[in-house]
Image: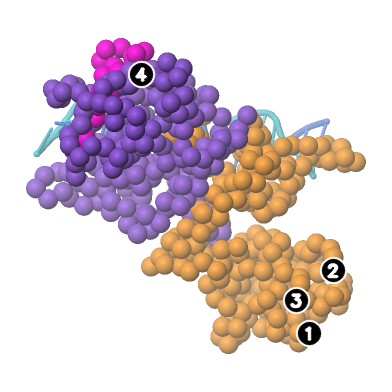
Chain colours: A purple, B orange, C blue, D cyan
Amino acid sequence: MTEGSYKQFCPVAMAAETLCTRWTVVLLRELVAGSTRFNELRRGVPRMSPALLSKRLKDLEAAGILERTPVSGEPDTYEYKLTEAGRDLRPVIEAIGHWGQRWVETEPSLDNLDVELLMWDMHRNLDTTPMPQKRSTIQFIYTDLPSARKNWWLLVMPEKPVDLCSVDPGFDVDLFVTVDLRTMTEIWMGLRTVDAARRDERLIATGDRSLETAMQMWLGLSPFAGVKKVAA
Amino acid sequence: MTEGSYKQFCPVAMAAETLCTRWTVVLLRELVAGSTRFNELRRGVPRMSPALLSKRLKDLEAAGILERTPVSGEPDTYEYKLTEAGRDLRPVIEAIGHWGQRWVETEPSLDNLDVELLMWDMHRNLDTTPMPQKRSTIQFIYTDLPSARKNWWLLVMPEKPVDLCSVDPGFDVDLFVTVDLRTMTEIWMGLRTVDAARRDERLIATGDRSLETAMQMWLGLSPFAGVKKVAA
DNA sequence: CCGGATCCGATGTGATACTG
DNA sequence: CAGTATCACATCGGATCCGG
């Protein structure tokens, strides 16, 4: 970007200088969502090269948007946390996402599905309040994926963050969800409901009855799932 | 930018693909502010090369954000008007500008002043309602600029758009404003008031008393002038 | 594993000039 | 007025590698 400024005194231009460089707002979305570690960020922004990620983190630190601090106890590991200025970017990210959900055609991006990214987003947004007050294990089986990426487990423990596994954790499974990747992504984006997918036999949920019927409730959707799409 | 997508199904990423390319949001700010013609846009985004401007306009048209239509009567001239999707970007631009005003240090960008851009912005935001119901001519004299860019005239006609001239239009001047470029830019950005600048003798306004005293009123400021700055 | 750095070819951008 | 053309240069993506 000619690493250079727009040379305008307008606040929009001044902000855009740091915000509107490639990958930056996607990275910020990940930070606003709560990721703090380098490799955690990589998982949320998988197609961004580590070199560019590193550069952007430095740029954002220099801009006062985040702070990099060593993690006590773990040498050579760092945490990237938003400053107040960074947290104040949430409305900006929300406005962009809101517009994107309303106006950007989804078809093209539904050709670029990514299970890992989907599961990563889902596990962060699960709403555990309507779930039983005990450990629950939910297994997702993606019918259209090769075996290495077919099975995913969400481990829900009361009072603890939800855990995501791509290898069998060995616990008894309380609910099996069998679905294809596109359908699950559409549900996550709010383009389709769990019930509709079950009626169409695109999604099958078997196991614990209460988990099964409340699925639309505990399955936290994309923060923008509620926004109505207008784009043709 | 590798003219390529982020390949994510997240609405933030989908929107950022078209919005967060270099110059795009600055251009959108200009469109949201009401400019419609190619050379009008150039004046609002003076450091953007015409080649890139042309490309961006095509991209935005392809994204459904604006429409290009021939101007009837004038061959080979076109108008670029925001579609509903484009007008719906106003909250996004506002959120970015709001954040910029709050958090971006202004000092660096106050080294990149631009009279023409400032006058262009000002003439568009003049609030003519508190002005006399007759033609008024206001001359700005920038004490620190070379003669070619020193003098500017704003022509206010009731019921008509404000006119901006960089050559003497020949009318009697109702109000003379003598000021340096930095001070006037600071006032425009809301970093300083007209009264404070007059007390500091950085700005002198002489002529019609009512125009003089109401200056802070009719001088429309930047849309973000009201946002309190936090940045150190 | 974690947190990067390095290299190189492809792509995007800026400056300047020019045209119907 | 409304753009193109051209060329040098900056940036980015992808792959690889590295030190703890």
Q: Residue at x 42, y 17 (%)?
A: A202
Q: Chain of mark 1?
A: B
Residue B193, x across and y down, in percent: 58, 78
Task: Locate residue A36 relative to residue A77 in the image: left or right.
Answer: right
Q: Which residue is mark 4?
A: A204
Q: Chain of mark 2?
A: B
On whether residue A142 falls in the magenta region, the answer is yes
Q: Chain of mark 4?
A: A
Q: Residue furthest right?
A: B73
**Which residues make up the magenta segment?**
A138-157
Q: Quadrant of residue B79?
A: top right
Q: Chain of mark 3?
A: B
Q: Judging from the image, what secondary structure is the residue with disc 3 in?
A: loop
Residue B208, disc:
1
Q: Earlier in the sequence, mark 2 or mark 3?
A: 3
Q: Residue at x 25, y 26 (%)?
A: A208
On whether residue A179 falls in the magenta region, the answer is no
**Mark 1 or mark 3, which is nearer to you?**
3
Mark 4–mark 3 Cα distance, whole angstroms, equals 67 Å
Whether A98 is drawn above or below B118: the answer is above
Q: Amino acid at mark 1?
A: Asp
Q: Is residue A99 visible?
A: yes
For label 4, count other residues whose C-alpha is less than 10 Å away and answer few (under 14), some (14-19) or many (20+): some
Q: Amino acid at mark 4?
A: Ile
Mark 2–mark 1 Cα distance, whole angstroms, equals 16 Å
Q: Which residue is mark 2?
A: B157
Pointers 4 and 3 within a single chain: no
